[in-house]
Image (cartoon, grey):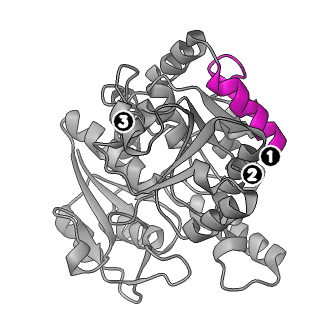
């Protein structure tokens, strides 16, 4: 099959959507399929070889993101790819272009719902008033959009349940998580070089990996350090909230125990997981939480906030730890996590094994084949 992946965000942007696309692309290509990514143009100096681009401008409210320019649906870009199926990642401008192109080219379209857009409004909407009205309008838009693809994919049961509860009525739906590379991310890696780099050899290390954005609630983890001794927090990633998080650490009196690494390459990232004693997220803004799965694959215990998207995966005191939304509950989860036994680490790895890249890529390929077959039958 030839698959066109149409996305609202791609390199040089780094977020869960970009990671998900890269993982799916790699898995599908291993199965012998051809994948072409089509994304907003970040500018000549930042283009990635092999990617097809739509003209775009930078999104001022969220640096690092790019918005394609209207008018012109640029179906000719997708026509030149000649896809058997169009896979849309995201729900903004590129999603609309992908659906228009699918209709014009008479090929099936599937869409993965990655992001609970409603939760981002308070941070990134240029209109700070009438937030409830904006949220209602977002769901009017989403209900209209998500019923149009031939199949709607979500990375977790929780995400599908939320969409259905909000009145979304897809033509068909499937739960296909973003797979994890269990060969690259494994428990036998040695993180000593990372510990030495950041002077962590004598400390227990709590790790956060992801975009540094306001909705990720990293402040709660920083505040929790005040109640925990001999623990340092390693924050891997970049994003618009970095300065805010540095100020939060300083105000909490723990700035010497919070290390910001900035962007880390894919080759070095596994060593950062290996350097940690516990992975932690306090985010309420996830449809899956890919970095949680990556940590599990490395045999790293995970502490997550008590949200259904995490409790579907993490079982308290079995393969990780669940805490309530407060800093004190977070601190207790840190204390439990950094002193847990090897049984929890083995269970963590076993959980990730059921969600490997290969298994998830096969599920995607089977879904593509199904929507292609059904489109032919309707013809």
Q: Which residues lie in the magenta part?
A: 315-339
In this orientation, does residue 87 appear?
yes
Which mark identifies residue 59?
none
Spot occupied by residue 26 in the image (x, y as percentages of width and height): 26, 42
Specify whether residue 306 is in view: no
Relative to 89, is 176 above or below?
above
Q: Of marks 2 and 3, which one's residue comes earlier in the chain?
A: 2
Contact between marks 2 and 1 (CB within 8 A): the answer is yes
Q: Percent position (x, y) of residue 88?
A: 42, 58
Q: Is residue 119 left or right of residue 76?
A: right
Q: What is the secondary structure assignment of the residue under circle 3?
A: helix
The residue wearing badge 3 is 271
Marks 3 and 1: in contact by CB < 8 Å?
A: no
Few, some or many residues within 10 Å of mark 3 (<14, 14–19, 20+)? many
Neighbours of disc 2 within 10 Å: few (<14), some (14-19), many (20+): many
Say which mark, if any, is on residue 223: 2
Q: Decide whether residue 360 is among the magenta residues.
A: no
Residue 328, how many percent across, how many down? 83, 41
Q: Which residue is mark 1?
A: 327
Q: Nearer the viewer, residue 314 or 80?
A: 314
């Amino acid at each position: 099959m030839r698959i066109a992946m149409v996305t609202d965000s791609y390199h040089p942007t780094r977020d869960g959507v970009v990671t998900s696309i890269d993982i799916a692309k790699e898995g599908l290509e291993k199965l012998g399929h051809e994948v072409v990514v089509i994304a907003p143009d970040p500018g000549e100096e930042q283009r990635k070889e092999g990617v097809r681009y739509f003209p775009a401008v930078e999104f001022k409210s969220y640096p690092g993101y790019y918005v394609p320019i209207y008018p012109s649906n640029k179906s000719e870009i997708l026509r030149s790819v000649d896809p058997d199926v169009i896979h849309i990642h995201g729900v903004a401008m590129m999603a609309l272009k992908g659906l228009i192109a699918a209709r014009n080219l008479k090929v099936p379209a599937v869409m993965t719902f990655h992001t609970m857009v409603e939760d981002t409004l308070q941070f990134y909407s240029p209109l700070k008033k009438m937030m409830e009205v904006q949220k209602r309008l977002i769901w009017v838009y989403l209900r209209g959009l998500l019923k149009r693809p031939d199949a709607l994919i979500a990375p977790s049961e929780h995400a599908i349940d939320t969409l259905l509860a909000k009145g979304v009525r897809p033509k068909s739906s499937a739960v296909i998580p973003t797979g994890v590379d269990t060969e690259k991310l494994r428990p036998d890696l040695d993180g000593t070089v990372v510990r030495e780099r950041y002077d962590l050899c004598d400390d227990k290390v709590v790790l956060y990996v992801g975009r540094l954005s306001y909705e990720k609630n990293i402040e709660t983890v920083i505040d929790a350090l005040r109640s925990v001794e001999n623990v340092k927090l390693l924050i891997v990633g970049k994003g618009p909230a970095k300065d805010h998080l540095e100020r939060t650490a300083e105000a909490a009196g723990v700035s010497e125990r919070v290390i910001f690494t900035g962007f880390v390459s894919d080759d070095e990232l596994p060593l950062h997981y290996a350097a940690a004693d516990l992975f932690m997220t306090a985010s309420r803004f996830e449809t899956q939480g890919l970095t949680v799965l990556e940590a599990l694959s490395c045999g790293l215990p995970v502490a997550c906030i008590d949200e259904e998207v995490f409790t579907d995966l993490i079982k308290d005191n079995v393969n990780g730890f669940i805490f309530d939304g407060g800093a004190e509950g977070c601190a207790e989860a840190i204390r439990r996590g950094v002193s847990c036994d090897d049984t929890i680490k083995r269970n963590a790895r076993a959980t990730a094994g059921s969600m490997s890249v290969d298994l998830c890529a096969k599920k995607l390929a089977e879904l593509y084949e199904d929507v292609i077959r059904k489109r032919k039958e309707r013809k």
